[in-house]
Amino acid sequence: MNATVAIARREFAAAFASPLAAVFLVLFAAASAAFAFYPGALFDRGQADLRPFFGFLPWLLLVLVPAVGMRLWAEERKTGTLELLLTLPVTTFEAVLGKFLAAWLLLGLALLLTTPLWAVIAWLGEPDHGVIVASYLGAWLLAGALLAVAGALSACTRSQVVAFVLAVVLCLLIMLAGQPLVQEALRGWAPAALLDAVAQLSFLTRFQGITRGVFALGDLLFFLATIAAWLAATVVVVDAKKAG
């Protein structure tokens, strides 16, 4: 655990050693506000809630999270520092978990920078703060799941661009798994049990349920299990690259 924390602290500090992290945070906050105020018509709806913000947030995360995750391992492989990292007295799992936690904390900080929207809504009306808290937690879990997928794909290639494109495409498919577009495509030949199983894998369906104020234990376990599974896949890939 000490090694994991050390790696996470190193990676988090390294992110702010260049302007990239600051640019990402500013871009995330600005894009979140823009989507909430303009397409979402936050003030024109006459309701004191953050539904427009959380409605657009998954699609914003779909693009910005892979942009963070693509660097986790592809850059290490391209610059040749992966071998150096793995020669340190740490296990592959500790390295994978440490790098993931650093990036997940960065995404959590990005979400915190959007809380002025919450303050404005609270000043103008009486929102359901419990739903908003649950929605923020759900957003962080969603970001973690997307990041875990992006990190695993980043470990598969030296190219950050390839890792980004693969992550966006795969995350989009998982996001839409429970939506009519995917369900109708499967309905003609897939049994009902398979349709239900695919729908349960949808990140978007889970997140939308949370934003409606239904934060079930199953949703929490789903996101944590998803993160754990993709981190395990990353460990397998990194070990395979190391052995090769």
Image: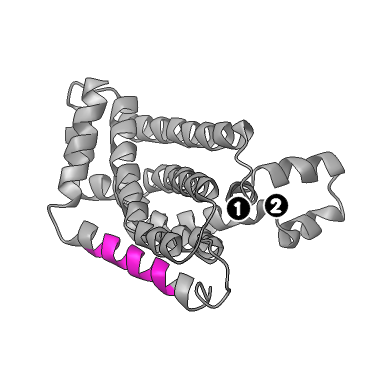
Mark 1 vs 2: CB contact within 8 A: yes
In percent of width and height, residue 146 lies at 47, 48
Type of the residue with mark 2: Gly
Viewer-side residue, 94 vs 73: 94
- Could you say where residue 43 lies in the image, as x and y percent from the top left? 50, 75
Q: Specify whether 192 is left or right of 94.
A: right
- Up-down relation of residue 151 to residue 36 (above or below): above
Q: Amino acid at mark 1?
A: Leu
Q: Residue at x 12, y 52 (%)?
A: 17
Q: CA distance from mark 1 to mark 2?
A: 8 Å
Q: Is residue 212 above or below residue 29?
A: above
Q: Disc 1 on helix, strand or loop?
A: helix
The residue carrying mark 1 is 204
Position of the C terminus by quadrant: top left
Label of residue 78 in the image: none
Residue at point 14% right, 57% down? Answer: 18
**Residue 226, visible in the rendered structure:** yes
User: Left or right: where does residue 80 sit relative to residue 234?
Assistant: left
Query: From the image, which quarter does the N terminus lie in?
Result: top left
Residue 56 point in image, percent of width and height: 52, 65
Please name whichever residue, 78 or 36, is drawn nearer the observer in this view of the structure. Answer: 36
| Neighbours of disc 1 within 10 Å: few (<14), some (14-19), many (20+) | many
Q: Which residue is mark 2?
A: 178
Q: What colouring method underlies this structural image?
A: one colour
Residue in the picture at 64% in, 48% down: 209
SS for tag 2?
Answer: helix
Q: Residue furthest left?
A: 17
Which stretch is magenta? 23-34
**Magenta stretch contains residue 219:** no
The answer to whether residue 83 shows anywhere in this view is: no
